[in-house]
Every structure is written in C-alpha cells, then in structure tokens.
C-alpha cells in the first residue's frame, strides 16, 4: 500500500517551493532538474496544487509559482487528500467483487483510511522541512 | 492509495473459507469460480496465508485448506501486515529522492501507517462477515 507517484512528487515540489527565499518564484525547469524528475510530471503536479489553492501561479516571462500560505498553515493531510486520486483503500470494482452488498470490509477500511488522514492532519509542511532548512537547501542547491 | 490486488484477493479467499461449514475443506477451484478470479492468484494467496499461519492446508485428493483459528480471533490488521508487500506509504527510492537524508516525510507517513494498522486491529474476520453469513453464503453459493 503506497501513495501514488503523483502525491510523492507533489510533496517534493512543495518542499522545494517552501525552501525558496521570500518573493522568489519557482519554475518547472529548476524543480525538474533539482530532483531529476520529468518536466511533464512537475507541470501536472503544479497544476493540481494551484487548483487546490496551495500555490499561486503567475504567467509570463518572469512568471512562476509560490506558496499561497505559510508552510506552518499547509496541512499534510489536506495535501494528501488533494493529490491522491483515491483514499478508498480497497477497490471492490476492479474486477467487480460479487459479495459487495454483504461485505463489511469496505467500511472497515474506510475507518482505517480516516485514521490515516487524521494522523497526517497533525503535521504541516513546516514539519516536513523542520530544523533542516539549511541542509535541504544545500542538497537542492537553492541559493 | 490502495491495497494491492494480492491483499484484496486474500480477504476474498478468507471470507469464503470462513463461511464454509465446519470441517469442510476449501479448494482452489471453487474459490476461483465463486469470485471469477484466476486459479493462479488464489493459489498464491493461499500459499501466503498458510505461511502466515492463518490457514492450514492438507495435501492429497481429499485435500484442501481451512482456517487454523476461529474468525473471531483472526485480526484484520494482522492479515494486512501479512499480505501487503509494503506499508511504507511513501517510496523514497524509486526514483531515488535526493533529499532523503533531511526530509521528515517518511517519519510522518510511518506514523500515519501505524495509525492505519492500529485502527484495523480493532476488527476481526468475524466482523467482516458479521450478521451477513446467510446472505454472503447465498451470493457465493456455499451449501
């Protein structure tokens, strides 16, 4: 059981942006290069983060994107809910399971999924990068 | 974020066996047929459930398999831990993420994964089939 790559990359992108100096906009190329992941994926992730109101994009030659809020107020649980295609842990439809009408497994996994997100809601983007700002900045070669 | 098909089918297999009359052994063919899933997958799942001490297999022409314990004592959390290849929710290795040494995301997701399993540990195989025995048996055409 794992997060999709989409969420994984979403976090990598957010970490990068959170480490930038104030007022510096990020761009697709530098993030793609910093992590060695494709521009295309970074682009899709950025689009979804903007749709979800976590980052703000500015078009044009001097454009780019930045966090809409402080890392201290961007909740890890909210990020996962925004980026994961589904938190229905068990998929009774593919292939269709014939006992769905009588099976209680889906409800049990819904409870567990809620416990998972509840735990994540204790954390913020600031916790992900906490006390490590300098080190992370160095690894990512952010100046 | 979803369980693997392997775990999903593992539960389907366990539900089927739990519904059988006492002393009746299950076999691969009937389970494969009841759910419309491949013999090969059922076989692999049964092998892993036997390795994990949840079911007991008997070889030979009159062979088959049955639960080793009562459904009331087979824990849903334990089943997931046995069947899922990983509960490391985020995979920092594929592709390798260069900020691993400084990133706290893995620890945060470990906490959430533990909360997930902790919630599942409140449930037993008997809860999955609770109050629905007759209905489930009918759907699966178990006599």
Image (cartoon, coloured by chain):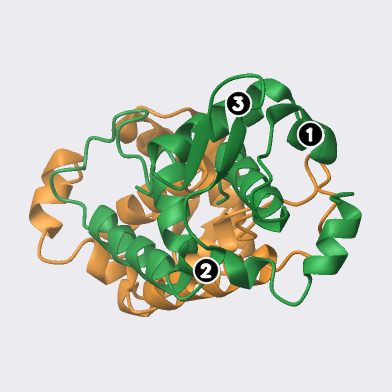
Chain colours: A green, B orange
- Relative to residue B81, is residue B85 depicted above or below? above
For the question of whether residue A65 can be seen, the reply is: yes
Q: Could you tell me which chain the residue with mark 2 belongs to?
A: A
Residue at the image position 36 percent from the left and 36 percent from the top: B30
Foreground mark, 3 or 1? 1
Badges 2 and 3, same chain: yes
Label 1 – label 2 distance at C-alpha? 24 Å
- A68 relative to B23 in the view: left or right: right
Q: Which mark is residue A43?
A: 3
Q: Secondary structure at mark 3?
A: helix
Q: Which residue is mark 2?
A: A124
Q: Is residue A45 above or below residue A110?
A: above
For label 1, the SS is: helix
Q: Position of residue B82 (x, y in %)?
A: 58, 63
User: Disc 1 designates what residue?
Assistant: A30
Residue A57, horizontal then vertical, whole percent: 51, 33
């Amino acid at each position: 059981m794992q997060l999709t790559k989409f969420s994984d990359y979403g976090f990598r992108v957010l970490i990068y942006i959170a480490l930038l100096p104030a007022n510096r906009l990020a761009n697709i190329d530098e993030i793609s290069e910093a992590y060695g992941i494709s521009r295309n994926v970074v682009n899709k992730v950025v689009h979804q983060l903007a749709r979800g109101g976590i980052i703000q994009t500015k078009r044009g030659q001097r454009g780019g994107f930045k966090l809409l809020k402080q890392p201290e107020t961007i909740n890890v649980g909210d990020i996962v809910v925004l980026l994961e295609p589904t938190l229905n842990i068990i998929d009774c439809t593919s292939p269709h399971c014939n006992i769905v009408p009588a099976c209680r497994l889906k409800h049990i996994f819904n409870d567990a999924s809620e416990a998972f997100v509840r735990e994540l809601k204790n954390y913020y983007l600031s916790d992900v990068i906490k006390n490590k700002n300098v080190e992370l900045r160095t690894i990512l070669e952010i100046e």
